[in-house]
Image (tube, rainbow, N blue to C red):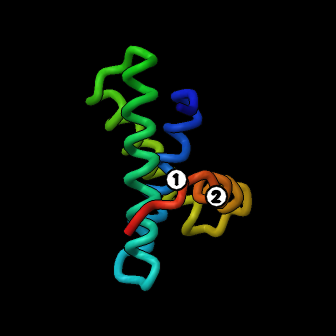
Amino acid sequence: MPPYPEALRCAALTSAAAKLGKGTPQASQLFDHQIYWSMAAADSGRAAGKAARAVDTEVGRDSTAAEARLRSQDGATAAALADCVRRVPALND
């Protein structure tokens, strides 16, 4: 299980990407990434003593900020997202 800050970052980035990718051919895959990292953030948050509501609030806040950076095509944000996506294990269909 990744540490909470790392899981939070990836959950926010993949959530932002999924929101931006709605209606695209990649939407299903983006949703899978979002689900994986959301679950990882929930598990890591729980292990760190955070309430589920606090985790949801932090993911939402950070996702909004990440969405703006992705829209502006920020290279560091895109690279961080790619790193998170690369670490999602293969999911069975």
Contact check, label 2 and label 1, Cβ < 8 Å: no
Residue denoted by label 1: 13
- Residue at horizontal 65%, vertical 69%? 73
- Residue at horizontal 61%, vertical 52%? 87
| Residue 16 sits above or below residue 36 on the image | below
Q: Quadrant of residue 48?
A: top left
Q: Quadrant of residue 38?
A: top left
In front: mark 2 or mark 1? 2
Which amino acid, mark 1? Leu
* Classed neighbour count for the residue bearing mark 1: other residues with Cα under 10 Å, few (<14), some (14–19), many (≥20): many
- Residue at horizontal 43%, vertical 36%? 41
- Describe residue 7's horizontal placement relative to residue 46 as left or right: right
Q: Horizontal and vertical percent for residue 27?
A: 40, 75
Residue denoted by label 2: 86
Judged from this view, the residue extending furthest toward the front is 92
Judged from this view, the residue extending furthest toward the left is 53
Q: Horizontal and vertical percent for residue 22?
A: 36, 75
Instruction: Please tell me whether mark 2 sits on a helix, a strand or a loop.
Output: helix
- Residue at horizontal 44%, vertical 70%? 29
Q: Horizontal and vertical percent for residue 50?
A: 37, 19
